[in-house]
Image (cartoon, grey):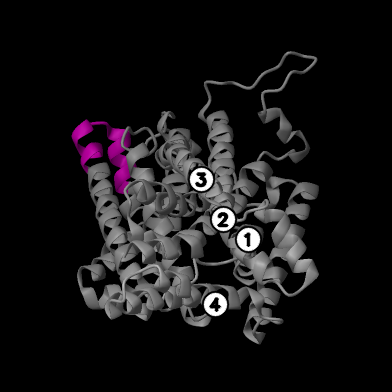
Amino acid sequence: MSVAASLDNTTSDPRHRARLVTGDQDFASVTKTVCQVVERPQAPPTWYIAFAVTSAMTAVLGLLIAYLIGTGVGVWGNNSPVFWAFDITNFVFWIGIGHAGTLISAILFLFRQKWRTAINRSAEAMTIFAVICAGLFPAIHVGRVWFVYWLAPYPNQMSVWPNFRSPLLWDVFAVSTYATVSLLFWYLGMVPDLATLRDRATSPLRRLAYGAFALGWRGSARQWHVYERAYLILAALATPLVLSVHSVVSTDFAVAQLPGWHSTIFPPYFVAGAIFSGFAMVITLMVPARAYFGLKHLVTLRHLDNINKIMLATGCIVAYSYAIEVFIAWYSGNAFEQFAATNRALGPYAWAYWTLIFCNVVAPQAFWFKRCRITPWMMLIVAVLVNVGMWFERFVIIVVSLSRDFLPSSWGMFYPTWVDLSMLACSFGLFMTLFLLFCRYLPMVAMAEVKQVLEHE
C-alpha cells in the first residue's frame, strides 16, 4: 500500500502520519542502500584489484591440484606416521568456518533474534563458500582422485560397498547434507530480494537472470505464507545440522585409539570451536564490507557487538575444553595420554600449541571490554587472531598427535612443503573470490527481512 493511500485510510493524527512516512522512507532507504552495490554499472577499482588477486590465487590452486593429481600426494610433506597433515587440517578448519552462517540463519531465527537479519545473508554465503573450500581437501587427499566415487554407496557389479561403520563415510553424508540444506536455505531467503533486483533492473540481461532465479515472485499474501512456512521448515532442518556436522567430523578422531584423539569431549569441543571460528570469520568479512559498501547504518555496531559477545562465550567454552583435556589426561592415569598432553606443550611443536593458546584463549578476553567490542579495528585484529589460532588448533590435534604415538621407533616429524603452504594460502583465494562475486552480483543484506523488522518496530 502506498503512503498516500495509508494516510487516507487512517486518522489525521500527525504523529501517526509521520510514522507512516518515516517507515516508507526507511524501506526505500534499505532497498536503495543494498541494491546500489549490485546495480552499479562498474564496480569500484579496488574491487577489480582484489578480484584479480584472489582469482589469480584460485587459478594457482587449480594448477596445484593438477600437479598433485599428476604427481601424487608425495608432493605434500605427509609421511609415516603423519599420514594426515595440512589436507585434513584445512578440511576441518573450513568446515568449522561454515558453522556461523547456519547458526545465525537457523538457530537465531527460531529464537526470534531480530538482530540477525542484517548479517544472516553474508554469513549464509560464507557458509556455502567455506563448504566448497572444505570439500576440495578430502577429495584430493585420497591419492587416486579418479576413484573418489567409490566413497558413495552405489550399486555396482562387484557388490562392494563402503564401510558404513567408518566415520569417514559419515563425513560424506554429513557434509553433503549440510551443504545441500545450507544452499537451499540461502537461496530461499534470497528469492524476495532477487525479485526486487528484477523489478529494478534496467538491463534486459539482468532482468532475465534475476527473474529466472526469483521464480515468479510477486509478493502476494499466498506466496508470503508458503515462503515463511518453507523457511521455517528449512530452519528446523538446519538447526540439528549445526550440532551434528562437526560432531561427525570429530568422530574421525575420537573413535581412534591414538593418544590425543581418543576422547569423548571432542564432539562438543569441536562444535564450540567451529562456532567460535565461524563468527570470527563473519567479523573478518563484515567489518571491511560494511565500511567499503556503505552498509554502516544496516550492519551497525550493535550487530557486531552481539557477534563479539557470542565469540566471547564460545571462546570461554573452548578455553575450558583445553583445560579439561589436560585434566582428563592427568586424571586418567594413562601414561600415553599424559605424554600426549605434555608433548603438545613442551615437545617440538610447542610453538604451535602456545600460538593457539594465545590466539584462542588470551586474545578473545579483550571482548570483556565494550570498547573492544564496538571498535572495528580492535575486533578485526582479535577475529584474525582467532582464525589463526583455530587453524593451529586443528594442526596440533592432527599433526602433533600423529607424530608421537605409542612406539618411539615409529615417531616422525612433519615438515610442510611449498605445495602444502601454497594450497593453504590459495584456498583463501578461492574463498575470497566467491565472496567478492557474491558482494558484486547478489544482495549482501536480506532486504525483505530487515523491512519486516522495521515494520514490527
The location of residue 417, given as percent across then percent down, is: 62, 59
The location of residue 405, given as percent across then percent down, is: 43, 37
Asked if residue 209 can be seen in this view, the reply is yes
Amino acid marked by disc 4 = Lys
Asked if residue 64 can be seen in this view, the reply is no
Q: Between marks 3 and 4, how big is the CA–CA gap?
A: 59 Å
Position of residue 244 relative to residue 374, above or below, is: above
Q: Is tag 4's residue or tag 2's residue first in the polypeptide sequence?
A: 4
Q: Between marks 2 and 1, how big is the CA–CA gap?
A: 9 Å
Q: According to the image, label 1 marks what residue? A: 195
Give neighbour class at mark 4: few <14, some 14-19, many 20+ (Cα, 10 Å). Answer: few
Q: Residue at x 74, y 38 (%)?
A: 144
Q: Residue at x 21, y 31 (%)?
A: 333
Q: Residue at x 46, y 74 (%)?
A: 3
Front label number (3 vs 4): 4
Q: Between marks 4 and 1, how big is the CA–CA gap?
A: 14 Å
Q: According to the image, label 4 marks what residue? A: 32
Q: Is residue 340 magenta?
A: yes
Residue sticking out furthest to the bottom:
45
Give the residues drawn in magenta, as a range: 327-342
Q: According to the image, label 2 marks what residue? A: 219
Front label number (2 vs 3): 2
Tag 3–tag 4 contact (CB < 8 Å): no
Q: According to the image, label 3 marks what residue? A: 412
Q: Between marks 4 and 2, how big is the CA–CA gap?
A: 18 Å
Residue situated in front as seen by the camera: 283 or 116: 116
Tag 2–tag 1 contact (CB < 8 Å): yes
The residue tagged with tag 4: helix, strand or loop?
helix
The residue tagged with tag 3: helix, strand or loop?
loop
The location of residue 57, given as percent across then percent down, is: 68, 68
Give neighbour class at mark 2: few <14, some 14-19, many 20+ (Cα, 10 Å). Answer: few
